[in-house]
Image: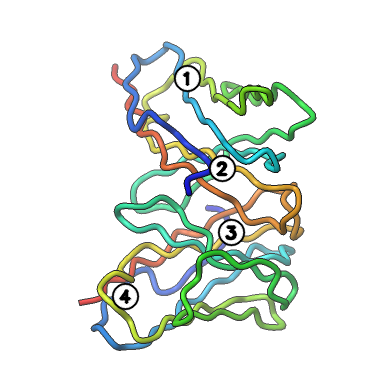
Amino acid sequence: DQQVKQNSPSLSVQEGRISILNCDYTNSMFDYFLWYKKYPAEGPTFLISISSIKDKNEDGRFTVFLNKSAKHLSLHIVPSQPGDSAVYFCAASPRDSWGKLQFGAGTQVVVTP
Amino acid sequence: DSGVTQTPKHLITATGQRVTLRCSPRSGDLSVYWYQQSLDQGLQFLIQYYNGEERAKGNILERFSAQQFPDLHSELNLSSLELGDSALYFCASSVAGTGYNEQFFGPGTRLTVL
């Protein structure tokens, strides 16, 4: 049962434009959400997180938006750079559990010149 | 560099064998997590240890076991290996054990079972 879903397996965006990655979840017990970036042959790298008491969190070029009623979050990358080409994973953690993360399947982002 | 180290980087073995994967967490982190990433699946949580004690368990097979030692490093033991166990195995660590903290991942161990 996939409780965290990233329905877009890939995204192509031009350098300098905005990348928008989407993530949906089904478990209402999730209250902490994270985005990770992964390059081939490396482990996932933490990007940004948001707790359920907020609806937006910003860190440099990265902004995460949370819509609790829709059980939806998104990651905006502005402006997109060639080094942003990677697989992006959305992850969520339930409040009643020690810190295991449930990951989405990932979205491959390709930033073109 | 996340500060989490994993050895070995690659492991090739045969079906029926047993292997041990090792993880050293970031300095100061008390929690260690193990994840499996297969080709056709995303990152699947296996097990979490906090300060030497098991705290959470995912879909970890009975053939797999783990432990965290007093110096906080962790080992994941995989036995009676099957072809389907071929995957990337990641270790992650965090300062605390609850969900409100980021997990930092190691580079992974690629296991190939022939």
Q: Nearer the viewer, mark 4 or mark 2?
A: 2
Badge 3 marks a residue whose secondary structure is: loop
Residue located beneath label 2 in the image: A91
Q: Do the residues labelled 4 and 2 touch (CB within 8 Å)?
A: no
Corner quadrant of residue A83: top left
Task: Chain letter for mark 3, please.
Answer: B
- Residue denoted by label 4: B11
Dot 1 crowding, Cα within 10 Å, few <14, some 14–19, many 20+: some
Of circles 3 and 4, the one toward us is 4
Tell me the kind of residue under disc 2: Ala
Q: Please, what is the three-letter code of the amino acid marked with disc 3?
A: Gly
Amino acid type, mark 1: Ile
Tell me, yes or no, whether the two marked residues, 3 and 4, touch with CB atoms within 8 Å.
no
Q: Which amino acid does label 4 sit on?
A: Leu
Q: How much space separates mark 2 and mark 3, taking CA atoms?
A: 21 Å
Q: Which label's residue is closer to the chain start, 1 or 2?
A: 1
- Residue bearing the label numbered 3: B3
